[in-house]
Image (tube, helix red, strand yellow):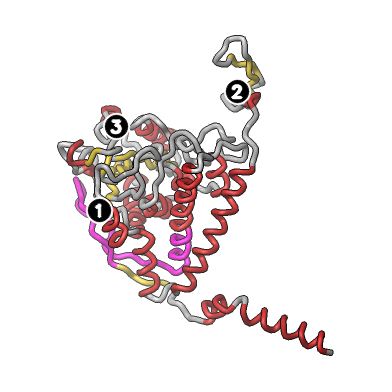
């Protein structure tokens, strides 16, 4: 009898303890949505811009929060793995810029297209790949999204064209993708991203010209995080009004730390392109917490106080969290639960990314061409041959 009572007691105590926080969250009545004022965009050659108020639903808010928190934790885990020498080579982290990748994705359709430079991990995730595939690619494993052969700068997904290592070279490619959208008569747009450091590249202005001539559905997006490698925008550019750089192309300057501002600006820009008016230019004012790459500590050309001030006043995750809690869209406890779930997802993905095998040497020539019969390609040494299989 005692054993039976003890067993019943254990079951009852487990039932009351385990889901306590979830019961608390479930029993509370949250608002379905809330209206927020957002910062007005600066405009160039536009009579009106995106709205200055927007509605955020509870469902969207929770999704955006989870996505931004996932990107943040994924980048911090990549930093840790790099310092442990598990990730090698180039690695550019985007923590601090989460509102850009999540906000842009929230403003377009899955069938739209996106191409960016080498700070690409966040976009790879928002375009639909898993944390596991991204971290495994960073560690050079077979389970990575490019089979472990692309690394940090060369990740791809459906309607996502990388990850490109040459400064500014992705911009003409983005204009070409937009040309394909128009040529095929599809109601699609291409988001073509580059940084403030690439904004002075000549090929960007050539792409502007052709996109304007042919009225291509291309949204040129300058992610201005204030430093091109270690050089501030004021020292690198005679004009730091990047949204006006298109001259004959309309532009808008957006608060890139506010996900709602980015989302509404992206919807506006996408609607402009879909209407057949041609390209438009967006400048997202954002900030990266890490250095340019892993070899850059990030504090030789800016102060720790500057970084801390941005973290305390403009952090994109903190801004969304405060809005949701203060407007009864979510509770602190509920968001903490999401944080715990995200941390577990990242840890599981990191374990996979360190345990998964590396691709064998004989697969070095695989996937060079699509839909081709197998053939041999020469290695660095002309006597070494590798088989190429699609």
* Residue 84 picture location, percent across and down: 51, 43
Disc 2, disc 3: CB below 8 Å? Answer: no
User: Is residue 388 left or right of 298 when viewed as pictured?
Assistant: right
Q: Which residue in the structure is indicated by mark 1?
A: 306
Along the polypeptide, which appears first: circle 1 or circle 2? 1
Q: Which residues are magenta?
A: 37-66
Indicate the quadrant where residue 215 lies: top left
For label 1, count other residues whose C-alpha is less than 10 Å away and answer few (under 14), some (14-19) or many (20+): few
SS category of the residue bearing label 1: helix
Q: Reply above or below: 163 against 11.
A: above
Q: Residue furthest top?
A: 383
Q: Is residue 73 magenta?
A: no
Q: Which mark is residue 365?
A: 2
Quadrant (top left/top right/bottom left/bottom right) for the C terminus? top right
SS category of the residue bearing label 2: loop
Residue at 42% x, 38% y is 115
Q: CA distance from mark 1 to mark 2?
A: 46 Å
* Residue 282 appearing in the image: no
For label 3, count other residues whose C-alpha is less than 10 Å away and answer few (under 14), some (14-19) or many (20+): many
User: Is residue 148 left or right of 296 when viewed as pictured?
Assistant: right
Residue at 21% x, 41% y is 233
Q: Nearer the viewer, mark 2 or mark 3?
A: 2
Q: Which residue in the structure is indicated by mark 3?
A: 204
Indicate the quadrant where residue 382 lies: top right
Q: Nearer the viewer, residue 286 or 174?
A: 286
Q: Reply above or below: 255 against 208.
A: below
User: Is residue 3 left or right of 227 when viewed as pictured?
Assistant: right
Residue at 34% x, 70% y is 35
Q: Reply above or below: 225 against 366.
A: below
* Residue 348 picture location, percent across and down: 60, 53
Q: Residue furthest front?
A: 84
């Amino acid at each position: 009898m005692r054993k039976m009572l003890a067993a019943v007691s254990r079951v009852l105590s487990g039932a009351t303890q385990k889901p306590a926080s979830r019961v608390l969250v479930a029993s509370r009545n949250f608002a379905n949505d809330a209206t927020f004022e957002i910062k007005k965009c600066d405009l160039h050659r536009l009579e009106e811009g995106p709205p200055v108020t927007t509605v955020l639903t509870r469902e969207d808010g929770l999704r955006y929060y989870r996505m931004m928190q996932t990107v943040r934790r994924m980048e911090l885990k990549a930093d840790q793995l790099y310092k442990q020498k598990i990730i090698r080579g180039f690695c550019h982290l985007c923590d601090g810029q989460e509102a850009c990748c999540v906000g842009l994705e929230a403003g377009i359709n899955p069938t739209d297209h996106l191409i960016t430079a080498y700070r690409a991990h966040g976009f790879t995730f928002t375009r639909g790949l898993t944390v596991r595939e991204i971290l495994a690619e960073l560690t050079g494993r077979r389970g990575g999204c490019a089979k472990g052969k692309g690394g940090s700068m060369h990740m791809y997904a459906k309607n996502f064209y990388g990850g490109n290592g040459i400064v500014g070279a992705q911009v003409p490619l983005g204009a070409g993708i937009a040309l394909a959208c128009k040529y095929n008569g599809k109601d699609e747009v291409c988001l073509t991203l580059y940084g403030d450091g690439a904004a002075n590249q000549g090929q960007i202005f050539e792409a502007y010209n052709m996109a304007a001539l042919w009225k291509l559905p291309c949204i040129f997006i300058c992610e201005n995080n204030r430093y091109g490698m270690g050089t501030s925008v004021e020292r690198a550019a005679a004009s730091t009004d990047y949204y006006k750089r298109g001259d004959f192309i309309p532009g808008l300057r957006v608060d890139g730390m506010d996900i709602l501002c980015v989302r509404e600006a992206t919807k506006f820009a996408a609607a402009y392109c879909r209407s057949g008016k041609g390209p438009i230019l967006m400048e997202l004012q954002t900030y990266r917490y890490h250095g340019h790459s892993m070899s850059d500590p990030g504090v030789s050309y800016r102060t720790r106080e500057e970084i801390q001030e941005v973290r305390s006043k403009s952090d994109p995750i903190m801004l969304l969290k405060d809005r949701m809690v203060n407007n009864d869209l979510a509770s602190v406890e509920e968001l903490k639960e999401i944080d715990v779930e995200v941390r577990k997802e990242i840890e599981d993905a990191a374990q996979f990314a360190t345990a998964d095998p590396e691709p064998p040497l004989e697969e070095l020539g695989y996937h060079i061409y699509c839909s081709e019969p197998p053939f041999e390609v020469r290695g660095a040494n002309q006597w070494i041959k590798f088989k190429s299989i699609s």
